[in-house]
Image: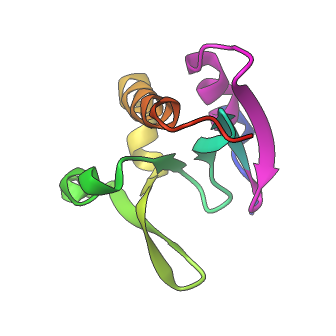
Amino acid sequence: MAYDVELADRIRELIEPGPDLTEKKMFGGLAFLIGGHMAVAASRQGGLLVRVDPDESDALLVDDFVETMVMGGRSMRGWLLVTDEALASDDVLHEWVERSVDYARSLPVKK
């Protein structure tokens, strides 16, 4: 399954353009990187892959539409998958994109 192009466009509209923003096809999805760090992606599995502070991961799993991302059979702390159902709301999408972009911007820029 390919990533949702419409979702990618919605993400693109929410992220302020700048020299630290890049887009890159990764893992079958379209990722948005800030300072070289992946912040958010339209996942090939459907939904939104978001990067969050690992210390906040567990607290963010309270909603049924959020789950820990699993890659290669391994749970990835600090990476969450927000299901398509939740993303029908622009407010929910905005909240998750903003959270992930803010976290990525808090990290040192990769060289």
Question: What segment is highlighted magenta in the picture?
Answer: 7-29
Marker count (numbered): 0
What x and y, as percent, mark residue 44?
Answer: 68, 58
Question: Residue 101 lies in magenta, yes or no?
Answer: no
Q: Which residue is at 66% across, 24% downward?
A: 12
Q: Position of residue 8 (x, y in %)?
A: 68, 35
Task: Judge from the rendering whether residue 15 lies leftward or rightward of residue 6; answer left or right.
Answer: left
Taking 16 as reference, is 95 left or right?
Answer: left
Residue that sits furthest to the right in the current view: 25
What is the x, y in percent for residue 78? 40, 57
Name the image quarter holding residue 41: top right
Q: Residue at x 63, y 35 (%)?
A: 109
The one of 77 and 97 positioned closer to us in this rendering: 77
- Identify which residue, 64 or 67, lies in the foreground: 67
The answer to whether residue 21 is magenta is yes
Judge whether 35 appears above or below 29 on screen. above
User: Residue at 53% of width from left, 85% of height from top?
Assistant: 73
